[in-house]
Image (cartoon, grey):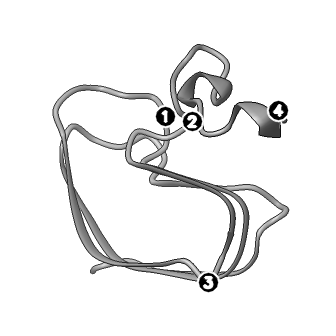
Amino acid sequence: ENIDRYPDASEFGGFGRFSASGIFARHVKGLVLSDLDFELLGKDDRPLMSFDDVHNSKVKDIAVSGEPVTDKYRIDENCTKLTIQDEE
């Protein structure tokens, strides 16, 4: 990490792009995401949402339309008490 360069987007993801096609959350406590709709316009091999060092947080009712998602969520093992409830 290079904290002095935040929030420079080029610091994330290796090839100058974020590690998620929708939401990338890092170093967060108490995040709540609810009732979100994503429309993917093209194929993207990245997960829709990526979580790194996220704690005491909740993700609920996330819908995706358009191109199929390879992996909807990527959750690093350093996350704790992250609850995900998808629409059915």
- Which label was assigned to residue 67? none
Mark 2 to mark 3 CA distance (whole Å)? 21 Å
Amino acid type of the residue tagged 2 in the rendering: Ser
Q: Residue at x 29, y 26 (%)?
A: 43
For marks 4 and 2 on the same chain, the one whose residue lies earlier in the sequence: 4
The N terminus - image quarter = top right
Q: Residue at x 67, y 19 (%)?
A: 14
The C terminus - image quarter = bottom left
Most foreground residue, 86 or 50: 50
Q: Quadrant of residue 30?
A: bottom right
Amino acid type of the residue tagged 1 in the rendering: Arg
> Disc 2 or disc 1, which is closer to the eye?
2
Left/right placement of residue 48 relative to residue 6 reads left
Q: Position of residue 87 (x, y in %)?
A: 29, 79
Q: Are marks 2 and 3 in contact (CB under 8 Å)?
A: no
For marks 2 and 3 on the same chain, the one whose residue lies earlier in the sequence: 2
Badge 2 is on which residue? 19
Q: Position of residue 12 (x, y in %)?
A: 64, 30
Q: How many marks?
A: 4
Q: Position of residue 26 (x, y in %)?
A: 67, 55
How packed is label 4: few (under 14 Cα within 10 Å), some, or many (20 or more)? few
Mark 4 to mark 3 CA distance (whole Å)? 24 Å
Q: Are marks 4 and 3 in contact (CB under 8 Å)?
A: no
Left/right placement of residue 80 relative to residue 30 reads right
Mark 3 to mark 1 CA distance (whole Å)? 24 Å
Q: Residue at x 84, y 63 (%)?
A: 78
How packed is label 1: few (under 14 Cα within 10 Å), some, or many (20 or more)? some
* Vertical side of 73 occupied by 11: above or below: above
Badge 1 is on which residue? 46
> Disc 2 or disc 3, which is closer to the eye?
3
Badge 4 is on which residue? 2
